[in-house]
Image (tube, rainbow, N blue to C red):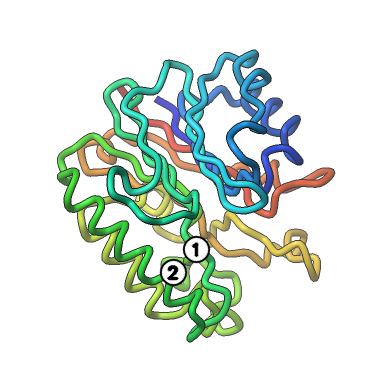
Amino acid sequence: MKIATWNVNSVRARQQRLLDWLHQVQPDVLCLQELKTAEESFPYDAIRETGYHAAVFGQKTYNGVAVLSRTPPRKVECGWGPGGDDQQARLIGVDVDGVRVISAYVPNGEQVGSAKYTYKLDWMGRLHSYLESRYTPTTPLVLCGDFNVARDDLDVAHPVRWANSVLCYQSARLALGRILEWGLVDVLRQRHPEGGIYSWWDYRMLAFPKNDGLRLDYVFATEPLAQRCTSAEVDREQRKGEKPSDHAPVVALFAN
């Protein structure tokens, strides 16, 4: 089972890239973030023509998450579920072929100490509670997405420069660590413990040609699935070319 995640930074702007990538890579499941479109504007027909079903939680201009799958998704749940009060489209969960797949887009946080940073930490705490209250570490589950946090300095080309940013600040890293401690394995780190692999590069200052990147995008899996992970890679090719997203896809392969 090939499971991938990609912050496309506008599904409409990156539509042809997305369709070409689906045709080329043929993942069984693809989690998308930062759709930047409402559900009624999502390119369902074009996605369907490539052989994929789409579960979408959209939002005009900002945010938006989706799960694309070859087999029809079941038990689709947007946001925090019944009683949820978050108006930002940042979380969607589905069942695909016996696996619970969750696509998450964690808030950026803007600036340490700001109200948006507080919201980021609160949102991550809520994600931990969401997992704890609904699932167990033995549930076949993958949590994919753009977490807007580099786990540690192995995930940052220039750690000192980024140390006080919202992407690397210690409280954000601790919040991400708590989510992992619930019972998740970072499968790319599992396969590449040496680090130095990035998934996001700023559009400015020639960051990509210099490989001045950070790893912000993850495929996390519970232990039963993580034990079956045979490969995990970042598809750097998708950060190249004309009008790319600033994120590259992360692709993990799980044995049956």
Above or below — where is 153 with respect to 67?
below
Q: Which residue is mark 2?
A: 120
**SS of the residue at dot 1?**
loop
Residue drawn at (65%, 42%) of the image: 37
Q: Given the image, on which type of amino acid does mark 1 rest?
A: Pro
In the rendered structure, the answer to whether residue 65 lies left or right of residue 158 reads left
Q: Quadrant of the N terminus?
A: top left
Q: Position of residue 93 (x, y in %)?
A: 36, 38
**In percent of the image, x 44 and y 33: which residue is there?**
3
List x then y, in percent, for residue 133: 17, 50
Please determine whether, in this image, residue 168 is positioned above or below residue 123: below
Residue 201, quarter of picture = bottom right
Q: Is residue 198 left or right of residue 133?
A: right
The answer to whether residue 250 is seen in the rendering is no
Closer-to-camera residue (71/84): 84
Question: Which mark, residue 222?
Answer: none
Query: In the image shown, does 206 or 130 lie closer to the viewer?
Result: 130
Q: Secondary structure at mark 2?
A: helix
Query: In front here: 3 or 226?
Result: 3
Circle 1 Cα neighbour tier, 10 Å, few/some/many (<14 / 14–19 / ≥20):
many
- Residue at the image point whose x is 72% and y is 33% from the top: 15
Q: Earlier in the sequence, mark 1 or mark 2?
A: 1
Q: CA distance from mark 1 to mark 2?
A: 5 Å
- The disc placed on residue 107 is 1
Image point (72%, 37%), residue name = 12
Query: What residue type is disc 2 on?
Result: Lys
Q: Is residue 121 left or right of residue 125?
A: right
Residue 212, horizontal then vertical, whole percent: 67, 67
User: Would you place residue 201 above or below residue 104 in this image?
Assistant: below
Q: Is label 1 in contact with label 2 (beta carbons under 8 Å)?
A: yes
